[in-house]
Amino acid sequence: MHTIRIAIGAGLALALSGLSIACCFLFGIHLAPGNEGLIYGALGGVADALKALLPLAIAAGIASGQRGRAAIGAFLFIVFSVYSFASELGLYAMSRDAQASSTSAGKEAYADLKDERARIQDRLKALGQTRPVRTVSAELTGQRQNALWQSSQECHEATVQASRTFCAGVAKLEGELAAAQEAEGLRAKDSELGQKLAGVNLAEALKSADPQSEALARLTGWPAASIKDALAILVALLIELGSGFGLYAATASGSSTAAKQDHPADVPAQDEAPATPQRRVMAACSNRPARVTEAVPAPDTAADPVRAFARAALVTKAGREIPAADLYAAFARWAENGGQEVLSPAGFGRRLTALKFQRIKRGGSIYYAGIDIACGAGRKAVARA
């Protein structure tokens, strides 16, 4: 069950890391057009992926005493986290702005339609009731067939009273025709706008540009802009903390406990190995019971001399490192004195790796970190045992 919990936690942490990587990549491609943007996006994504592994590397560096490497890892983690946090804030802001712009554009388009239709209707009211264009046009055509139309040179030379009266009537009809034509065009436009307005989704057109921020602003009394900024920071922190520390937190309990301080409460009484002669010899030269917490529990130590040696002769001690050669020499002498099988150095190393002891390679040599020989005199006492 413990393993399943760690696996689920690690999977969820990796999912958060994937989301953070995607945010950094998407933000990066907006920094520049074309291939340059893709380079920035890939750069941010790779740095963010490395960020998720840095806490594990920092913890390992501290446990093995490599303070310089741990400090470099911490510096890189801070730099990568700041960039990732800024990327998530920027992406959130761009997304919210795009949504607000789209909503505002819809509202403005709907308002423009309503305003234009209102102007048309006001103009139609000003024009009043008009006769149909065809009626006025036919009447005007008839007047132009009158003899006075010809004698007045189409009303350009209305010199007598009869011509002037006739031409005044023609001018009136021409004005009425123009008003009728305008009214007819306005009514067609009004009908078209009415159809457009009827097809508008009012719920979509009239919705708030940022309902979440506006609702919280009403509840808290804070400005909507401040709420929007706070939400952006909250989302960025959620992604950043989950992607930065999620993997470390989910897997920390599953790592070897060889880096912990030895304490009688480290191992329950039922997990202790039987009091074999080898164990009594090793415990006799120490001021405290020799205990070790195994990452792979198994009660049958008789069939596994390395496990029996670990239980009888090793204790956990933070900051301690033992060369692999010295540890194997202690095991060989311990096994010979107790009549146990002496494995080869390679076999001994494989069994220690299977037991999840922390193995470090440095300068061409192998060390095991976080453990010590139980005997108070160290390796020499073990050799005598």
Image (cartoon, grey):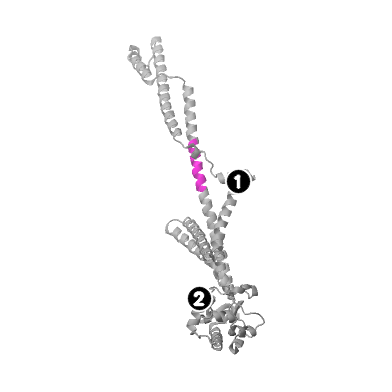
Left or right of 183 in this view: 225: right
Q: What residue would you read off at disc 2?
A: 354
Q: What residue do we see at 53% from left, 56% from top?
A: 88
User: Can residue 322 be seen at all in this image of the molecule?
Assistant: yes
User: Where are the magenta residues, as a range?
Assistant: 97-110
- The x, y position of residue 231, in whole percent, is 58, 51
In the image, residue 188 above or below residue 223? above
Image point 55% across, 62% down: which residue?
246
Image quadrant where residue 64 sits: bottom right
- Which label is found at residue 216? 1
Locate residue 165, reporting x and y percent.
Answer: 41, 11
Where, by quadrant of the figure, is residue 283 drawn? bottom right
Task: For the C terminus, give its image quadrant.
Answer: bottom right
Main SS class of the magenta portion in the image? helix
Q: Amino acid at mark 1?
A: Leu
Q: Is residue 376 visible?
A: no
Where is 215 relative to 293, above or below?
Answer: above
Is residue 28 depicted above or below 96 in this figure? Answer: below
* Magenta run includes residue 108: yes
Distance, label 1 to label 2, CA atoms, is 54 Å
Q: What secondary structure is found at the residue carrying circle 2?
A: helix
Number of the front mark, 1 or 2: 2
Indicate the position of residue 160 as horizontal and vertical percent values: 39, 10
- Circle 2 packing at 10 Å, graded few (<14), some (14-19), many (20+), is few
Residue type for callout 2: Ala
Q: Nearer the viewer, residue 129 or 153?
A: 129
Residue plotted at (41% across, 28% down): 188
Q: Magenta includes 17?
A: no
**x%, y% of residue 248?**
55, 66
